[in-house]
Image: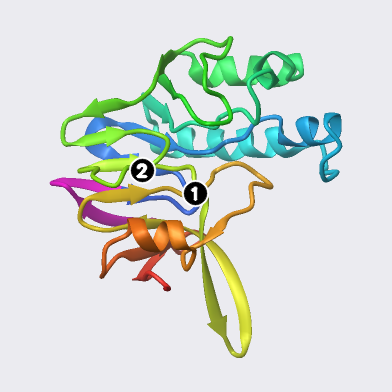
Amino acid sequence: MSHVFPFQGTQLVALPSGALFWPDRNLLVVSDLHFGKSARASRFGGAQLPPYETRETLLRLEDDLTGTRARQVICLGDSFDSPEVGGALPEAELLWISRLQAGRDWTWIEGNHDPGPVGLGGTHLAQMTLGPLTFRHIATATGQGEVSGHYHPKAMLSLRGRQLSRPCFLLDQTRLILPAFGTYTGGLTTRSAPLARLMAPGAQAILTGPSPCAIPMPR
């Protein structure tokens, strides 16, 4: 199941995984893959994470590409957890990425973790505009028709006296912020100051999971 919603004159689809699909363009958009997060953390003394997050992320990405049959892909920055990780991934994972790219128009948008081009195929851009939408890593204060990532938004919900956290899309009339697609990426609550400032009154949070649904953005 997925959630269809209008944005800037387009019909977009929020997928359970946190990916965005634009059917009219046959375009899949993902943000903040953070390939190599566990390897970087281990190398520089960070939290020790199971070394399988890149494979788990690639599995989910492959499932979405198969399910949507997307022929175009935009990765909205922070695709790699640090600039040097792209060349340090295991050969099997690099080949997996190349296989997913084959036959597709693939664009890597620059992020703050990976500010320069990575040593893989595809196009590398600071931002990209298609029709009424502009794709960039970090939302701007004046963005119109802006699709971005960076903040890893999560909604905190109270259910039967328990606090639950769910990655979410954030949507208002001018901007759309995607959740992080990568495994073990953490997140910033919708009540945080940066997101509260960016999102207009009446903004929605589209919760990810088996049955994505829209709720008023928790503030």
The answer to whether the residues at label 1 and label 2 have Cβ atoms under 8 Å apart is: yes
- The kind of residue tagged 1 is Tyr
The answer to whether residue 189 is above or below residue 100 is below
Mark 1 or mark 2: which comes first in sequence?
2
Counting labels gives 2
x, y percentage for residue 192? 49, 64
x, y percentage for residue 194? 44, 56
Q: Count residues near mark 2 (Cα–Cα under 10 Å), then give few for <14, some for 14-19, many for 20+.
A: many
Magenta region, residue range = 1-12
Task: Return the mark for residue 139.
Answer: 2
Horizontal relation, residue 165 to residue 71: left or right: right
Mainly helix, strand or loop, the magenta region? strand
Q: Residue furthest left?
A: 9
x, y percentage for residue 93? 69, 21
Secondary structure at badge 2 equals loop
Task: Return the mark for residue 80.
Answer: none
What colour scheme does the image use? Answer: rainbow
| Visible residue check, residue 205 | yes
The answer to whether residue 128 is above or below residue 63 is above
| Visible residue check, residue 105 | no
Is 77 colored magenta in this rendering? no
The residue at the point 27 percent across, 62 percent down is 200
Horizontal relation, residue 43 to residue 56: left or right: right
The answer to whether residue 181 is above or below residue 3 is above
Q: Quadrant of residue 75?
A: top left
The residue at the point 30 percent across, 25 percent down is 128
Q: Which residue is mark 1?
A: 151
The residue at the point 71 percent across, 30 percent down is 36
The residue at the point 45 percent across, 62 percent down is 193
Q: Quadrant of the N terminus?
A: bottom left
